[in-house]
Image (cartoon, rainbow, N blue to C red):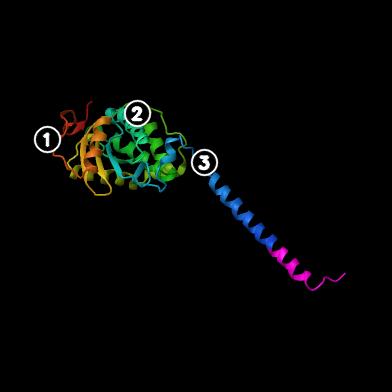
Amino acid sequence: MRLAPRARPLRRYLLWLGLAFGALALLLGGWLISRTDTPRTADSPLARLAVPAGPPWDYGAANPRFTLVLYADLECPYCKAYVPQVMAWVDRHPETRLRWHHLPLPTHEPTATRLASLAECVGKSGGQGAFWQAVAWIYQHTRSDGLGLPDGTRYPGLTPALQACLDDEHATAVDQAQARDGARAGIAATPTVRVRDESTGQSLLLPGPVEDDALLSALDLLAAGAQPSAAAQPPELSAIPDGDMPR
């Protein structure tokens, strides 16, 4: 049976409408799959990690008002106690992020640099989350004060690619470059925190471990546009030259 002349455009219209809906369904399905490939929960600390791989190695908001640059040594026992505390503080203050800066102390060498290279290589292969997980694993297992990992202790999931990175001098070069930067800035003790206001470029150097109230005070001072003198800093934040920073 032949279709009436007026029925042909209607059938053609319905055909194009069906194709359009099909294409829309495919696009929506692909978007949903891409959203579920890397699930992140709101209560997970790693959910707030900056997306790009490092260095720099950042923990917290991607584009915050304030950055806490942490100068730390992976063999420093005071850093070992302080890093989880300052990460938890950043979790409670979404206007901040934590940025790692290697500062292996001469008294902890060569172990400190070797462990820094391990963290760098893990981060290079796995991204921001992997770097911070490596830092946590190292602090959990190292004996500190330059003694390093117990004999026979190996990082879990040590792949040939990760071993090749450890054998490469590039990771060590990154650690040494950051150590030189810290020395040029006059930082010789760990942990030390530089609080920087990203909107103004002003910063405040706080030898640590830095208490929560002192961090909040630093944010308030920088937000007000003030640059406090070293004499105005609380006495408990004074540095001890060339060594670990006691509490």
Q: Position of residue 210 (x, y in %)?
A: 25, 31
Contact flag, marks 3 and 1 (Cβ < 8 Å) = no
Identify which residue is drawn at 56% across, 51% down.
31
Three-letter amino acid code at disc 2?
Thr
| Residue at 39% in and 40% down | 131
Residue hosting label 1: 231
Numbered marks: total = 3
Q: Amino acid under label 3?
A: Pro
Q: Nearer the viewer, residue 113 or 95?
A: 95
Residue 74: name its quadrant: top left
Q: Measured from the top left, where is residue 64 in percent x and y?
A: 34, 45
Earlier-in-chain disc, 3 versus 1:
3
| Residue 107 x, y percent position in the rendering | 22, 32
Question: Most extreme residue toward the right, as rendered?
Answer: 1
Residue 87 is at least partly visible in this image: yes
**What segment carries the magenta color?**
1-16
Q: Which residue is mark 3?
A: 39
Which numbered disc, 2 or 1, marks the residue that appears first in the sequence? 2
Where is the C terminus found, in terms of image quarters? top left
Comparing 37 with 220, the one in front is 220
**Which secondary structure, mark 1?**
helix
Mark 2 or mark 3: which comes first in sequence? 3
Looking at the rendering, in which quadrant would you find the N terminus? Answer: bottom right
| Residue placed furthest toward the left | 231
Q: Report crowding for label 1: few under 14, some 14 to 19, many 20 or more residues within 10 A (C-alpha).
A: few
Q: What numbered label is drawn on residue 3?
A: none
Q: Nearer the viewer, residue 102 or 172?
A: 102
Residue 142 circle label:
2
Dot 2 lies on which element? loop
Mark 2 or mark 3, whichever is nearer to me: 3
Main SS of residues in magenta:
helix
Front-lying residue, 113 or 193: 193
